[in-house]
Amino acid sequence: MKIIVIGGTGLIGSKVVSKLSALGHQAIAAAPSTGVNTLTGEGLDQALDGAQVVVDLANSPSFEDQAAMNFFQTAGKNLVAAEITAGVKLHVVLSVVGTELMQESGYFRAKLAQEKLVKSSPIPHTILHATQFFEFVRSIAQSATEGETVRLPHSLIQPMAAEDVASAVVDAALAPPCNGTVEVGGPDIFHIDELVGRVLAHDKDPRIVILDPEARYFGVKLTDNFLIPGKSAKLGSTKFDWWLTHVPPPKK
């Protein structure tokens, strides 16, 4: 089966392409670097010709409110148009657990707009809501850094390994469309301040985590349910402790 992976050269996308290829599918990584640009439409029709499934993993290059909205709206409309022309049978999009709750953030407003566009399209779809990746914890620390301190709330988070996210995406791509949302998360629940502290300690990072109930998570004031999936979520198997000691941090 021909499956186009938009954003197929990124962290999740490269894993998805590899897993689908190993299963015998014609998995094609579509990204600006491979001549496919959803924002301009360049190369879309050619890439999607003969494709049965499109997996959209592309992310806005900017988290600024209007830039993110423009990206997801424009890229989404271009992708839908190309899918209709190609006769695509399934559109899978990766989104975030709690998107509908974190509407203080312009980025999450843009993600919700993307989801609404997918739902209104005539293409059968599956929206995959994943919790935050283990690989993103260091970015959470960076966003909350003030000098030598990291200010975070004591909110709950149930993160998962990128490898498990990719496996969930593959499962969604090979299953019939649910025309709704599927949630996936990690095997364990943590407090976000303690989780970040563990990563900094492992990295021998001198920054100190400060518990601050008023601290924001990318502009959002969290409650305990924002970053936690529902009870019906499918859970990944990779434990955080194993990941921390076996997956090297990204090169700076």
Image: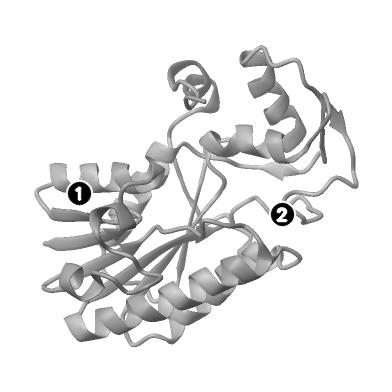
Kind of residue at badge 1: Leu
Q: Which residue lies under the disc numbered 1? A: 20
Give the residue displayed 31% in from the left and 62% down from the top.
Answer: 55
Q: What colour-coding does the image apply?
A: one colour
Q: Nearer the viewer, mark 2 or mark 1?
A: 1
The residue wearing badge 2 is 225
Disc 1 secondary structure class: helix
Q: Of 1 and 48, which appears nearest the observer?
A: 48
- List x then y, in percent, for residue 77: 41, 81
Q: Give residue 221's position: percent from left, percent from top.
A: 81, 55
Vertical order, 79 against 140 (above or below): below
Question: Where is residue 34 shown, x and y percent of the image?
Answer: 24, 54
- Residue at image position (15%, 46%) is 21
Q: If you read the primary sequence from the N terminus, does the residue marked by circle 2 or circle 1 appear first?
A: 1
Q: Quadrant of residue 220?
A: bottom right
Assess disc 1: are there few (<14), some (14-19) or many (≥20) residues with their C-alpha within 10 Å of its C-alpha.
many
Element assignment for label 2? loop
* Amino acid on which the number 2 mark rests in the picture: Asn
Q: CA distance from mark 2 to mark 1?
A: 33 Å
Q: Is residue 86 shown left or right of residue 111?
A: left
Please give the name of the residue rendered at 68% of the width and 21% of the height, measured from the top-left corner: 200
Q: Nearer the viewer, residue 219 or 169?
A: 219
**Residue 58 horizontal side relative to residue 170, left or right:** right
